[in-house]
Image: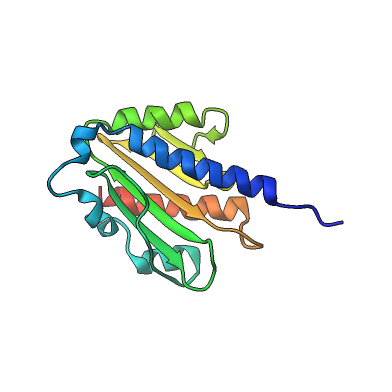
Amino acid sequence: MKRSNRAPLVRRVSTLVLVAVLSALVVPAALASASVPAAKKGCKYLKLSEVERVTGKDFKKGKAPTAPGPVAVCGYEAASQVGTGVYLWVDTTDNAERGFEGAEAAFDEDGVEVDGFGTNALYVGEGLNTLYVLRGGALVYVQYVTFGDDADPATVQDAVEQLTKIVLRRT
């Protein structure tokens, strides 16, 4: 008898919603009304060709993830694999540290420390596949959502780490 994957999928979707809500809560409404939101410039931190090289998949520019106004965001979606995407957020506001603390509080039991990113780095797997890094007053988090046979947790985490290193070099 084949087991249903519904419960893990529901948990993954619930976690993604939590991240979106968490992102919206860490920046006050006053910052969200900034005249020129940085969200339009998020893809300068990570190029399409880099996402394809690191993941080994064909991607296209996708819908940007939800974030408060001044947080830079970018999204790429797999060209032929529904539900697979790479998303990034770069928060360089005064609220970056509070955002990282919020991620730590939200994912305390599910997060693991990651070598090579300093003391303020937290990786959350279990379908969320997101690495949060607070460095130099900026909060960077990169997420690689992928399902199916190619979703080996170690391979996905390695890809997230590589992508995060690229983003950090440009932050």
**Viewer-side residue, 64 vs 91:** 64
Kindly give the residue lying farthest to the left in the view shown: 35
Query: Based on the displayed image, in which of its 4 quarters is residue 116 positioned?
Result: top left
Residue found at x 25% / y 34%: 137
Which residue is at 42% across, 36% downward? 121
Q: Position of residue 81 (x, y in %)?
A: 54, 69
Residue in the foreground of this view, choosing between 77 and 51:
77
Q: How many numbered discs sit on the rendered protein?
A: 0
Q: Is residue 144 left or right of residue 25?
A: right
Residue 78: percent from left, percent from top: 48, 67
- Estimate the x, y position of residue 101 in percent, counting from the top left: 39, 27
Residue 90: quarter of image:
top left
Q: Is residue 10 above or below residue 57?
A: above
Q: Residue visible at 30% across and 36% down?
A: 135
Q: In screen coordinates, is 1 left or right of 49?
A: right
Left-right relation of 26 to 79: left
Q: Is residue 130 visible?
A: yes
Above-or-below relation of 153 to 14: below
Asked whether residue 115 appears in the rendered view, the answer is no
Image location (x, y in percent) of residue 98: 32, 27
Out of 23 and 146, give the one closest to the viewer. 23
> What residue is drawn where x is 49% and y is 63%?
55
